[in-house]
Image (cartoon, rainbow, N blue to C red):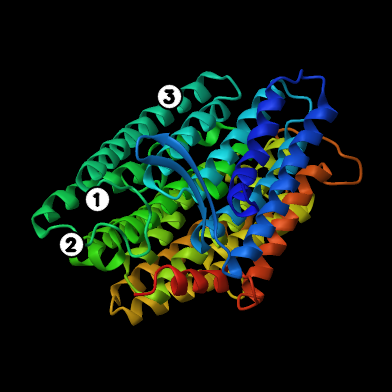
Amino acid sequence: MSWSTTLPLLIVGSSLLPGLAIFFLSEERVVSRTILNLTGAFLKLVLVGAMLWGVSHGHHYETRLPLLPELDLVLRAGPLAMLFVTLSAGLWLVTTVYAIGYLEGSPHRSRFFGFFSLCVTATVGVALAGNLLTFLLFYELLTLSTYPLIIHRGTEESRRAGRVYLIYTIAGGALLLLATVWLYTLTGTLEFTVRGFLSELDTSLHPTLIIIFVLLIAGLGVKAALIPLHGWLPQAMVAPAPVSALLHAVAVVKAGAFGIVRIVYDVFGIEFTASLGLTLPLAILAASTVIYGSLRALFQDDLKRRLAFSTVSQVSYIVLGVAIVGPIATIGGLVHLVHQGVQKITLFFCAGNLAETLGIHKISEMNGVGRRMPWTMAAFTVGAFGMIGAPPLAGFVSKWYLGLGALDAGQSWVMIILAGSSLLNAAYFLPILHVAWFKAPPDSWPMERSFGRHETAWALLAPPMVTAILVLVLGLLASAPFSPLEWARLITTREFAP
């Protein structure tokens, strides 16, 4: 096998093998577990960097392994795949550092980090999938590997959240499987193809294809948290903060949104999807989710639940950008896949810091917390303003291109959605910043852990500081080479051009 055929497999294996090894470590093997975690994360980042350079220079990377008769397990690296892979690899490293600090001294760490690594393996497999069968296998592995993370605390509340998560995701997976088998019986192929592989089918099959499209979007919409399939996500916030960060920024919801992009562009093709009359309903569903999530966030006092409903809203920008049908809006949706991830992971890291250091879980408990934990709240402030879309932060770039794309495609109604969403974002984030920075702190906090002269442990503080700086850098240097924005342009040029 050549380097071009082994590199995708190595990238998947760089988290799979350490994860499997970690399962066999005793709880006392802290150093060994940390070395395996960080070595796998750094190695994956190096391998992804090599592949990113190769893809940018036109190199082809593909691993093809026999799986079923006439159906292979295919890992293929293209510009779209590399956008998601790079996000996953980069944020896995910072989340690993955070999780090591967060779980210090807690039980069942080997089990946690084993499934944590499997979760990232599944996410990378979803990104690199070269056909719908490979996508489905890794998509379901993602379900199975995240369930133990959600119930990690072992409380009745976490077990209940895990049951709800399984009900939603297994049902979604069943719909996805049904649609995949149906497609294969019609076409004899499941290969992702530039501009889709369905547009040449006989016109008499179009009603059937519409039904299959609805099944696919419903199956993927569970993890993408499209309404009314979002109910599992707020309940899953009982999981530890590193898991919440993983669910919202790196893995589950992004896998759903990424899958919808694949279906629209690489299975149906955007022109064929539009000709079937499916893009406008998809855009309306995404826009409704954007507004609904923001409205629900307004009324949450629990900080992580407010952030969860914010995710319901924000991830749908990706779907909205795709459904608008135009290159500029597509760029906005794709770049938001990265920008939302970096911003949201910052916010969840900070929420975890507040909970672990001061016992703060509710916004009503945050009075004056900016004076006690200024660096944590500074990072939170950057992430919040990024979500609102304030310039020059990363979120502004996403919304700017979505707005320009909507106008370019003649979908001016989307501007109302974007403006209303930004106002709602401000309405549920600014009160948090007000109480944290401008209200007097209480005489005592619900719980307070001492870290000497530092506000919290360095492993908890460094990750949100790094990602907050990224939020600023990705906005200021949006047009720099290899920025997410420029990479999104490359995707639309190479893979999505008519």
| Pointer 3 residue | 163
At label 1, the amino acid type is: Phe
| Residue 173 appears left or right of 108 | left
Most distant residue in the front direction: 1
From this viewpoint, is residue 236 visible? yes
**Callout 2: SS:** loop
The amino acid pointed to by label 2 is Leu
Horizontal arrangement in the rendering, residue 145 relative to residue 241 (left or right): left
Going from N to C along the chain, the mark reached first, 3 or 2, is 3
Residue at the outermost left position: 204
Q: Which mark is residue 240?
A: none
Towards the viewer: 227 or 143 = 143
In space, the residues marked 3 and 2 are separated at their CA atoms by 37 Å
Q: Residue at x 77, y 37 (%)?
A: 101
The image shows residue 410, relative to residue 122, as above or below, that is: below
Q: Residue 384: x percent and y percent?
A: 59, 60
What is the crowding at mark 1: few (fewer than 14 residues within 10 Å), some, or many (at least 20)? many
Asked whether the residues under the numbered discs 1 and 2 touch, taking CB atoms below 8 Å apart as contact, a structural biologist would say yes
Taking depth in this image into account, of 497 and 357 the one nearest to the observer is: 497
**What label sits on residue 213 in the rendered view?**
1
CA gap between label 3 and label 1 equals 27 Å
| Mark drawn on residue 276 | 2
Instruction: State which tag comes first along the sequence, 1 or 2.
Output: 1
Of the 4 image quadrants, the one containing the C terminus is bottom left
Which mark is first along the chain, 1 or 3? Answer: 3
Residue 197, by quadrant, is: bottom left
Q: Secondary structure at mark 3?
A: helix
Three-letter residue code for mark 3: Arg
